[in-house]
Image (spheres, rainbow, N blue to C red):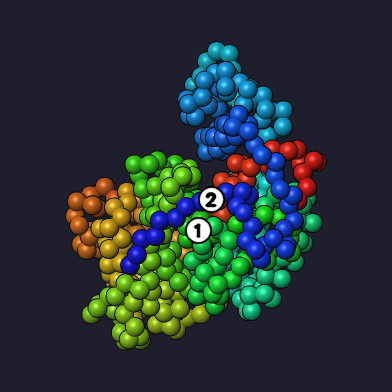
Amino acid sequence: MYFNCYRVVNMFNQPPSSSSRRTETRAAAPAVTPVEALRIKHRKETLVALRDHGPLSRVELGRHIGLSATTLTKVMADLIGLGWVVEAESQRPREVGRPQIALGLVADACEVLAVAIEADALTLAIVGLDLEPRAVERHAFAAVDPEATITELAALIARHRAAHGGGARAVSVAVPGTTDSGLRNVLWAKPLGWQGVPLAERLEALCKLPVAVHNNTRAMGLAEFRHLGLHEDQPLLFVQTRFGLGASMVASAAPAKNGHYGASELAALPLGKNGFRAVSTDTRLLSVVGERYLQAVLGAGPADGPVVPLLEQRRDAGDATARKLYAQTVDNLARGLAVAVDILQPCVVVLGGIYTPASPRCVADLLAKLREHAEPELTLDLRLQCSELGVAGALQGAAMVAYDGLLADASAYRSRTDWQP
């Protein structure tokens, strides 16, 4: 198992590589003065606060981002003038007296196109400033030669933009594999059979938009952290498995200069004698908790529906194989999680992928087993639950990464009618 620190960088301000200079489609941005850079920083902080906590009054907003009333007034004048923020009266429950003026986002004032790639499906959505996916489309997908796949993806993006207004200012792609720290290349994506693929460069040449490439488990973990309203002293471990098994550790939903989250690889953890060897002699964690293995033991397929609820149904019906498989699956997954809990010490563990629809009983059984295998003091207040976002988490997380760079770029604040890729 390894823990890999990860750094979000501004995809708009990177010097192009020698190969990307030939396909450069954006004019060089003019130099930004220190004063303008500070104003852009304040705009971004304001938009993120309204996204994650809004609508807010000016007093509440100032408290969240720590700006003086004078500075905040200038920032709000900029954003309201751009049409990114609006004012509205707000009368909250149990409040009396004159309604406050609340500030809220105009969600479609700035949009990105988020793409989540899985081994058998591809999902696209427009994601506005509020991070709510809209115009969601899901397509059957079969990864083939990377170049052919990228061409097909570019065509889908073009059709989606044409059908839904075409206002996206960037594309962010979540992939099931390892990406580089510049959010440009797919280093290794086993479910897709891709290695060393310059995905961002190729898509930018075809789509004429900035592109970020991101690991899907990291994206989901970031979205779950924000969705649950956690803060820095409540680190979250997000674990998902289907064709692969990965985990992301998130300690903040805000970007930081030295990185704000990382990923841990759980798939190759050895399980020793507790592996369910009746079907497989492979004792890696992935081999005994993943979708294909569970389906193989149950004699089931995609047409039988989600595999974990199916396993639980057959266990409850008295099927001996299902009872054994359920017990060993819970134990093996708990052993893998225990290693991560002992090393990373999260406060919350969220299960995604095929375990998203697991029952409360399954979660309780898993937590009980986890407490047997992990250091006892690290599990006393540990919270374990299933994902509430599902695939939408990959779209939201990918969009958050895109906005990290987009909102720090001066050209992003031009009006929609003036903006050109």
Location of residue 74 by image quarter: top right
- The quarter of the picture where the N terminus appears is bottom left
Q: Secondary structure at mark 2?
A: loop
What amino acid is found at the position of numbered circle 1 in the picture?
Ser
Q: Secondary structure at mark 1?
A: loop
How many discs appear? 2
Of 100 and 266, which appears nearest the observer? Answer: 266
283 in relation to 131, above or below:
below
The residue that label 1 is drawn on is 181
194 up-or-down from 399: above or below: below
Dot 2 corresponds to which residue? 9
Measuring from the top left, give residue 29's x and y in whole percent: 70, 44
Which of the marked residues, 2 or 1, is nearer the chain's N terminus? 2
Question: Which of these two is toward me, 380 or 1?
Answer: 1
Q: Is residue 177 left or right of residue 360?
A: right
Tell me if 107 is positioned left or right of 323 in this view: right
